[in-house]
Image (cartoon, rainbow, N blue to C red):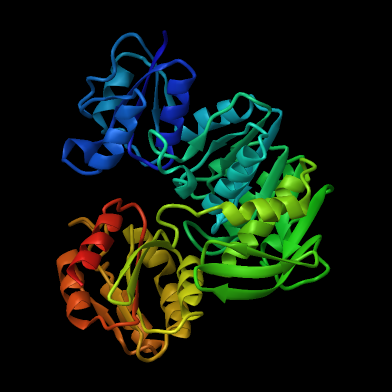
Amino acid sequence: MKKIAFSGASGNGISPLEQIMTLKGYTVYGTDHSFDIGKDAERKKALSDVGINIVHQDGSAITDDIEFLCVSAAIKDSNPDVKKAKEKNIPIKFRSDLLREIFSQYPYGIAVGGTAGKTTTTAMIGYVLETLNKKPCMINGGALCNFQNNKGIPNYIYNEGDICVIEADESDGSITKYKPFVGIVNNVSHDHTSMEKLMEYFTTFSNNSQNIVINLDCPYSSQIKHSSYKTFSTKNPQADFYAHDITATANGVEYMFMGEKFQLQMLGAFNVSNALATITACSFLNIDPKICAKTLEGFLGIKTRLEKIGSKNNITIYNDFAHNPSKIRASLEALKAYSGRIIAMYQPHTPFSAINTGNEMAQEIAQVLEENDIMILQEIYELTKDDVGITSDNIVKEIINNGHKNAMFLPTKSDTKEFIVNNVKQGDRIIIMGAHDNSLADFCREILEAI
């Protein structure tokens, strides 16, 4: 039996690959610094439960009989596993390269791209295909709520059929590596790099795709040209797939599509766009659009994507992975469709993110929030002592400069929790936003318990 190792085992991109390779018959070893310091215990147990051997990130996983070490783009050369692999001349593969190898084994590959919505859309497609017994393989960055009682982390579906659905990441440019049967460009917005570079990535991705799905509502994705494409829209009835009369419901959203009313068990008009992207992609597999829309009514969403953690004393708290201007705006707008004040907290994940999108983020937040809504910025999650002059407080000042005066800088979780518990009122909706920090869900639960 072949042995392989993964460094960064807890990561959203690495963890589905570990689990799939275990099901393929490999002996899999996984390491993660967060496990070593006592964090992400739930994810550690979930991975162990499916047969992954979790060991310390000290190079001990890299033995002479390891076929290769798989790492994410975030793993540095100073990582002990990487250093040991280089000493032993054991091949090192990026996560995206292993994903490409698996993806290329399926004749009908669907790669979901876009700076927002790709995790949810990937999950929606996987859920529809699995529910309709199409036996897909799905590799995703987010865990499906429908499968949360399954063993392991439910961010994958494994079948050896002829369809594979993946989330294609533009943040490191790896989206250009895939050659799908269907490529989806959900949208293009300012995030990890310049708009020029993003458009370059998505244009190459489109050229690599046999068929392409385009969101007409995005001014950037709508520029993409292809010889075989279908479009979707919530604004333009000339699109191939068009939804309208989108209305917030008590627990989600409903919409009109092809003369019938459908609903989703998720908040936000943006999720109707994700549903349309799913319907459009599945149409290339000759799946009836109405059957697809009806099947999506059973989809429960993704963990950490505007996920309702709970309600208490007529106060509801949500955990959200939103971490760029368009995602934050979309989540806040989804909550503004309901009555009640918003108390929002955002924790920028990296210094680069705070610098690259901070001013744009401040503008979006100030435009959406009303006078009595409260916006809290925590200090940057991955800030180090070398990051001089960079702080979340800079974004707070820009939010205030853009007209929303009820914004504040509270550096730590304890500061944030104390403020929220002391100031929350019945009818409020609390949303905790940020990426990379897997403890935010537990933080939401702590606040809920303390209310």
Above or below 416: residue 374: below
Q: From the viewer's side, name the closer residue of 56 and 129.
A: 129
User: What residue is drawn where x is 68% and y is 55%?
Assistant: 294
Above or below 339: residue 8: above
Image quarter for residue 131? Answer: top right
Q: From the viewer's side, name the closer residue of 396 and 389.
A: 396
Count up the numbered dots.
Answer: 0
Can you give x and y, in whole percent of width and height, for residue 4 in the image? 39, 18
Can you give x and y, in whole percent of width and height, for residue 242 in the image? 76, 65
Can you give x and y, in whole percent of width and height, for residue 8 in the image? 33, 35
- Quarter of the picture containing the C terminus is bottom left
Image quarter for residue 84? Answer: top left
Name the side, left or right, on which 77 lies relative to 423.
right
Above or below 248: residue 383: above
User: What residue is drawn where x is 34% and y is 80%?
Assistant: 428
Q: Is any atom of residue 431 visible in this view?
A: no
User: What residue is drawn where x is 69% and y is 37%?
Assistant: 180
Q: From the viewer's side, name the closer residue of 54 and 128.
A: 128
Name the side, left or right, on which 213 lies relative to 140.
right
Q: Is any atom of residue 369 visible in this view?
A: yes
Image quarter for residue 74? Answer: top left
Can you give x and y, in whole percent of width and height, for residue 265 in the image? 54, 61
- Quarter of the picture containing the N terminus is top left
